[in-house]
């Protein structure tokens, strides 16, 4: 099932109010880590899967990429990307990630930020990414961490007074659809194990070059309320890989 939640008016308005939507990459808690995992973009052809508002496409072009293609299922997200982050070197295409079909060696770098947990099969997309990359080139992505997605509610357990007790982890090896609550709305996501992400890459032929469970920056810990709770469980998984 391909859900297009970001075209829902209420959800879109709420997502647009998040720091990462208003401030861009600097408003994204994991950016200080993800940025370090990206390869040199100079002269490269970039594909961004689930590009949203186009922040990463814009960053790639500003950092010397020859071209960037942003794919997203949401017309609303792409309308904003077109309006605010357009360039002759960027093309935005409204398409489900599952349906991409690029000729072999079309890209030198494929990136994806927080989109693959909306996709049922990581292995299918991994194969498509592998084929679309030139030999020796890079694949870098972030997803919600399997510990974060396993149970499904994507919320803490609280005591009677509303204090956080712990993060529930259950049904870990039962991969598949989860009805989560994100921004107060029901959103369909897909839980996958760490093994699925790592072995999906290895089986496809990628060499894993980095894997990080990012922690908030020192600055965020001191300036953003509630950030210290982010040290209690991983929320994201960041992976970089190279096509052999
Ligand atoms: C959390 S947002 C991340 C946006 C952007 N990558 C960023 O980090 O700022 C997830 C994005 O994935 C897109 N998305 C979700 N499911 C998708 C699918 N099946 N195909 C293409 N895009 C999808 C959504 O429309 C949304 O723009």
Image: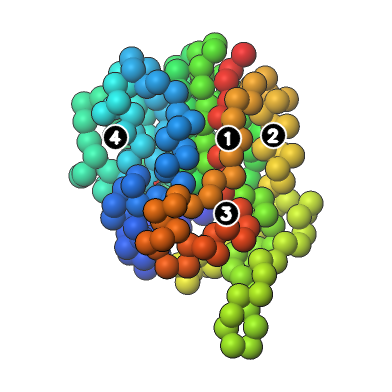
Among the two numbered marks 4 and 2 on one chain, the one whose residue lies closer to the N terminus: 4
Tell me what residue is drawn at x 61 percent, y 53 percent.
Answer: 234
Callout 4–callout 1 Cβ contact below 8 Å: no
The residue furthest bottom is 160
Question: CA–CA distance between discs 3 and 1?
Answer: 14 Å
Q: Position of residue 171 (x, y in %)?
A: 77, 59
Question: Dot 2 corresponds to which residue?
Answer: 198
Question: Dot 4 corresponds to which residue?
Answer: 58
Question: Dot 1 corresponds to which residue?
Answer: 239
Among the two numbered marks 4 and 1 on one chain, the one whose residue lies closer to the N terminus: 4
Q: What element carries label 4?
A: helix
Can residue 1 be seen here? The reply is: no
Among the two numbered marks 2 and 1 on one chain, the one whose residue lies closer to the N terminus: 2
Q: What element carries label 2?
A: helix
Question: Dot 3 corresponds to which residue?
Answer: 235
Q: Is mark 1 on a helix, strand or loop?
A: strand
Question: CA–CA distance between discs 4 and 2?
Answer: 28 Å
| Neighbourhood count class around disc 1 (C-alpha, 10 Å): few under 14, some 14–19, many 20 upward | many
Q: What element carries label 3?
A: loop
| Neighbourhood count class around disc 3 (C-alpha, 10 Å): few under 14, some 14–19, many 20 upward | some
């Amino acid at each position: 099932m391909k859900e297009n939640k970001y075209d829902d008016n209420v959800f879109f308005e709420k997502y647009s109010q998040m720091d990462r939507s208003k401030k861009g990459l600097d408003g994204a808690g994991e950016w200080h880590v993800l940025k370090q995992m990206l390869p040199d973009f100079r002269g490269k052809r970039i594909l961004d899967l689930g590009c949203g508002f186009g922040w990463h496409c814009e960053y790639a072009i500003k950092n010397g990429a020859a071209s960037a293609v942003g794919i997203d299922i949401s017309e609303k997200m792409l309308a904003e990307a077109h309006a605010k982050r357009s360039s002759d070197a960027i093309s935005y295409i409204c398409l489900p990630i599952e349906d991409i079909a690029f000729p072999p060696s079309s890209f030198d770098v494929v990136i994806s930020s927080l989109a693959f947990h909306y996709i049922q099969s990581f292995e299918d997309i991994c194969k498509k990414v592998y084929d679309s990359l030139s030999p020796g080139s890079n694949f870098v992505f972030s997803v919600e961490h399997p510990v974060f997605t396993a149970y499904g509610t994507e919320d803490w357990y609280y005591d009677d007074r509303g204090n956080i007790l712990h993060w529930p982890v259950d049904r870990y090896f039962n991969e598949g659809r989860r009805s989560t609550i994100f921004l107060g709305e029901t959103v369909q996501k897909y839980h996958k194990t760490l093994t699925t992400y790592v072995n999906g890459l290895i089986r496809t032929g990628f060499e894993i070059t980095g894997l990080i469970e990012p922690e908030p920056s020192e600055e965020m810990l001191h300036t953003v309320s509630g950030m210290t709770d982010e040290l209690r469980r991983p929320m994201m998984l960041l992976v970089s890989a190279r096509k052999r």
